[in-house]
Amino acid sequence: MRRWPLSAILSFWLLTSLFTFRCDADCRAGTKGEGSGSVQRAAKDPVDHRGRPLYKPGELLVVFAPGASEADMTALHGRTGASIAGRTRRNRLQRLRFSDSSTALAAMQRYRKASTVVHVERNALRYPQAEPNDTLFGQQWALERIAAPAAWEFTSGSPQVVIAVIDSGVACQHPDLAANIWVNQAERDGIAGFDDDDNGYVDDVMGWDFAGASGTQTDPDADPSDSSASGHGTHVAGIIAAVGNNAQGVAGLCWSARLMVLKVKADDSEYYDTYDIIQALDYARENGARIVNCSFGGPDRSDLEQDAFQRLQDAGIITVCAAGNSGLDLDGGQPLYPASYNLANIIAVAAATPTDTLAAFSNWGPLSVDLMAPGEQIYSTVPGDSYAEARVIAPHAVHPAIGLLYAGTTEAEGITGELVECGEGYADEFPSGLQDYVALIWRSDAAANFLFSRKVANAQAAGAAAVIIANNRVDDLDQNGGTLGTAGSWPPAVSVTQTAGQALVTKAGQTVAVVNRLETTPEAYAYSQGTSMAAPHVSALAGLIWSRNGPMADHQVKAAILEGVDRIAGLSGKLVSGGRVNAQKTLCIAARVNGDLNCDGRAGLEDAISAVQLIAGQHPFACRACLAAGTDPLPDGIVSQADAVAVLQHLAGLR
């Protein structure tokens, strides 16, 4: 840091004290006084941290007193050289335009001293936060909730940050992911069929498939592509790093990072093999990943798997793990691994709803689950080819759903009809004489052995055009869906969560639409939910931190993420941090430098100037989240004269 001479510091302080702290309107404009004949100290209009003008050049906003006559206003405008660019209906607020900013600033004192004027200020500009132009961004409620657009003011990620996705693979050719897939350059530029980088894997250009196409045989290969039958890993990858601001699809939270694709789930399998997971963890560690996303889990610990995660910790790699979807307390004797391994580099993540509550399906734990992130109704990338999309469109609400296997399909608009609650779907619970309605049927207790196929067949026989199966408990049906057993001429039938079912009951008698469509496209997107969707938000946030603050240690990154949450009263005693991730606040905390008021990651003379200007009302860029994080010299969340003094003392080496 440059050390400023004490004499220069004191001279600056004296000047700003005399100039600013009387804090009247002409001071804010940078004028000296009408009698001096001098107009402006600097001709250049002030800008924010991104170089954008803070004020409309050459314009003022003036509020006149109720008694001011048109003649009074016209005369004052004539003396200042103002032209009226706009006025409110009652003529009290006027937008004035001058030949240039210097003239406008000089006019401020005249207006301030005029008895007919109530208030005058510069015409301040506002800018949208860094909202990307991705066409489906509006469907990504989660990014707005965790303040992603504000975080993107600092960084959208870096290609130098590699995030390993250990999952079912990724559709690497997806147009919203392809540009961000990690590439092993040694293999890409090497000899086909040869292990060019001597890492034990031949032609591993985009990662590795440890599981192969079939779970019944060992056939690993260099193609870690996700199958359309799963799509889990592709959905996770899009949450992390779908290409942002490319005028298509969705935006990942860390949209400039690189995704290392490590496939550990075979295309025809329902499980992730620990043997494959261990290999993938070691591959990530040995090939440059800084963050590893693990959206999977199981109830039994593995010493060998824990050792592999320990090796990640020893290498300074953060591991983000899904807390699981059974609605259980992981500290109550029902752990889930790897989330429950007692390792400092693991961040265990629960799922949040759009209303900032803990999702009904989400596991939790006051000692072992660190925080929550959005995990319901998450829209992201899925593989091309054919994919299923299901939902129930009710008045004023859209409920994600899962199509029952073998159920009939619909067009994009779905099957529309009157919603009728039909109990558990027994034959005598359907309305008599009604046709083409939508039947809402509750799932039965397991002991009843009343299959979905029987329920749907009864509904079809009773004239229903579509069927909604509402879950009566929280379990894997909410993530995996159900089946009708065999193919046939079934009507469209979908399942929804218990919460959605309870909400739909209140819409009985109203028109709803059931959508269960099969889409074929290379650019595919869909909703999904679960702690599997929550974890990648945190992986991406760690990527943002390291994109902006590369030298930080993994424990510092984890600490910043936990400290930066928005604390929520209902989570007290549920999660370690008691809150839901906030990307902007976390980045402010991660880059926290005492005295850094303009959020450039250092304390300098510019911050002293920012403090003076802020006190004087000139409103330069100042990140309120940074102030809340304690970046002001006197960490009280406000900027005062004492803060400006503290910055100057710091620069002079006096504190």
Image: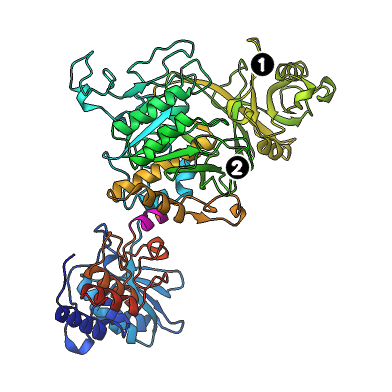
Image: 368 above or below 243: below
Image: 254 above or below 259: below
* 529 and 67: which is toward the camera: 529
Q: Magenta-highlighted stretch: main secondary structure?
A: helix
* 32 and 99: which is toward the camera: 32
Q: For numbered disc 1, what is the local secondary structure?
A: loop
- Where residue 64 sits, quadrant-wise, is bottom left
Left/right placement of residue 567 relative to residue 136 reads: right
Image: 272 above or below 126: above
Q: What stretch is highlighted in magenta?
A: 585-591
Image: 600 above or below 135: below
Q: Which x, y percent locates residue 486?
A: 65, 10
For mark 1, does the 10 Å Cα neighbourhood hold few (<14), some (14 to 19), or many (20 or more) residues?
some
Query: Residue 359 — which label?
Result: 2
* 519 and 527: which is toward the camera: 527
Q: Could you tell me how far apart the alpha carbons at marks 1 and 2 are, in whole angstroms?
A: 27 Å
Q: For numbered disc 2, what is the local secondary structure?
A: loop
- Where residue 107 sits, quadrant-wise, is bottom left
Q: Does the magenta stretch include residue 587?
A: yes
Left/right placement of residue 546 relative to residue 384 reads: left
Q: Which residue is drawn at 45% across and 69% down?
A: 89
Q: Do the residues labelled 1 and 2 touch (CB within 8 Å)?
A: no
Query: Residue 484 — which label?
Result: 1
Q: Which residue is drawn at 37% across and 52% down?
A: 556
For mark 2, does the 10 Å Cα neighbourhood hold few (<14), some (14 to 19), or many (20 or more) residues?
many
